[in-house]
């Protein structure tokens, strides 16, 4: 593992136990030496499931597996198993075989049907998963299941890491209930929207019907994982899975009109946004956590497109890394976004310092104050494009030579 990101939180949070959930990790030697690279979560009978996946047209075998069983199943799940170091993507029939074997071996160990076991893989694309590591590692993994103690949570979050410099976890109490939401995620590079370029496994002991759970997850993903970018690249393996064990209440939420649903949605939003922000804070080589707000667009969708044009621009991102208040690069990014913008009404802020108004540099603008803001670890850019009421916020990071160092030697 590389040095911990300077934007990392102080430590891994203490996550609560989730009734109906057990966790395990194991060192199978799939790619990494002397570290766990397999993760398993066993779920109580009746646990419901929802998922969102990459929109890449070259998805991994585990993504295909999960999409199929989610579409064809009864909306329940008994386990999720994930390996790190190998994406099991672009591996042809061998990838499908490895996915089926993984589900079969875990199913045998747990005594459940393979089609109720969800899969995820992350790591190098184009390399087949070693069958011997699966045959030896997966049964051993199932033997190590533990309750969701703080140590078990942290071990699980560590086992799914690749280039991540820190483990990511978050939780929330659902108001008015004894239930919680807790989850782990991985992601550091190949991070852009189009589902969410990362893995996240989130669990609650509230009971929620499958269609309601899917609606809640889709809503939360749209404003969290789909609003982050590190490098504009979308992975083959992106997967977010949400499981509801129902072990803390007698009656499940059957409709979005249930009085408990709003509190559940709010708690889920908080957890997913926290995890999404942690992924950006762990962006490969990142030294700045950047919030970009766009207002005055024709629609919210147009504002989001403009915001991502700014956030994905290498010129903007390298200027942020250099703490250079070169606001002309922001103008460039707005102009290339392909969305309506009035050049002569454009307004720009770097942090609290207004840079431009009515299409020109603002009288009294202080580059020194703007630069002072850029020297901070957390940076904000705000743009009003002057054509409507649409708005959006995204989060990104700067682009440093550290990104090149990590990715130039990723397979070595």
Image (spheres, helix red, strand yellow):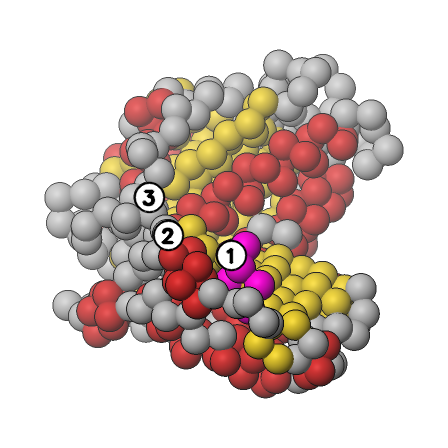
Mark 2 — residue? 376
Residue 35 placement, left or right of 287: left
Residue located beneath label 1 in the image: 351
| Mark 3 closeness class: few <14, some 14–19, many ≥20 residues within 10 Å | some
Q: Residue at x 37, y 52 (%)?
A: 376
Camera-near label (3 vs 2) is 2
What SS does tag 2 mark? loop
- Answer with the quarter of the image where residue 390 lies: bottom right
- Counting residues from the start of the chain, the first of labels 3 and 2 encountered is 3
Q: Nearer the viewer, residue 158 or 28?
A: 158
Q: Which residues are magenta?
A: 350-355
**Residue 259 locus on image (x, y percent):** 82, 25
Residue at numbered disc 3? 8
> Where is residue 358 shown, x and y percent of the image?
69, 76
Is residue 141 or residue 384 the one in the foreground? Answer: 384
Q: Position of residue 382 (x, y in %)?
A: 59, 62
């Amino acid at each position: 593992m590389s040095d911990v990101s300077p934007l990392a939180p102080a430590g891994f949070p203490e996550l609560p136990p989730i009734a109906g959930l057990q966790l395990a990790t194991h060192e199978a030697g799939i790619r990494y030496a002397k570290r766990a690279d397999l993760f398993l979560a066993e779920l109580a009978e009746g646990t419901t499931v929802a998922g969102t996946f990459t929109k890449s047209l070259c998805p991994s075998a585990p993504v295909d597996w999960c999409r199929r069983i989610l579409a064809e199943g009864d909306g329940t799940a008994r386990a999720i198993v994930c390996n790190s170091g190998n994406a099991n993507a672009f591996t042809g029939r061998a990838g499908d075989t490895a996915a089926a074997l993984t589900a079969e071996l875990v199913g045998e160990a747990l005594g459940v049907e393979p089609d109720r076991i969800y899969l995820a893989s992350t790591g190098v694309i184009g390399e087949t998963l070693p069958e011997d590591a699966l045959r030896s590692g997966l049964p051993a993994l199932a033997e190590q299941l533990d309750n969701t103690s703080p140590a078990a949570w942290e071990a699980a979050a560590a086992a799914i890491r690749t280039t991540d410099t820190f483990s990511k976890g978050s939780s929330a109490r659902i108001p008015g209930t004894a239930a919680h939401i807790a989850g782990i995620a991985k992601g550091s590079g190949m991070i852009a929207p189009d589902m969410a370029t990362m893995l996240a496994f989130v669990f609650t002991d509230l009971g929620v019907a499958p269609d309601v759970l899917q609606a809640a997850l889709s809503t939360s993903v749209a404003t969290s994982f789909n609003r982050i970018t590190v490098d504009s690249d979308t992975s083959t393996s992106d997967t977010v899975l949400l499981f509801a064990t129902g072990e803390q209440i007698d009656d499940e939420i059957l409709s979005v009109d249930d009085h408990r649903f709003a509190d559940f949605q709010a708690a889920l939003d908080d957890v997913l946004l926290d995890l999404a922000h942690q992924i950006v804070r762990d962006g490969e080589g990142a030294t700045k956590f950047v919030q970009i707000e766009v207002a005055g667009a024709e629609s919210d969708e147009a504002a989001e497109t403009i915001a991502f044009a700014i956030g994905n621009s290498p010129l903007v991102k390298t200027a942020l890394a250099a703490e250079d208040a070169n606001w002309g690069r922001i103008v460039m990014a707005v102009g290339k976004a392909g969305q309506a913008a009035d050049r002569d009404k454009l307004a720009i802020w770097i942090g609290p310092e207004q840079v431009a108004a009515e299409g020109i540099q603002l009288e009294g603008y202080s580059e020194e104050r703007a630069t002072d803001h850029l020297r901070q670890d957390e940076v904000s850019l705000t743009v009003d494009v002057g054509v409507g009421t649409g708005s959006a916020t995204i989060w990104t990071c700067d682009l440093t030579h550290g990104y090149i160092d990590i990715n130039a030697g990723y397979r070595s």
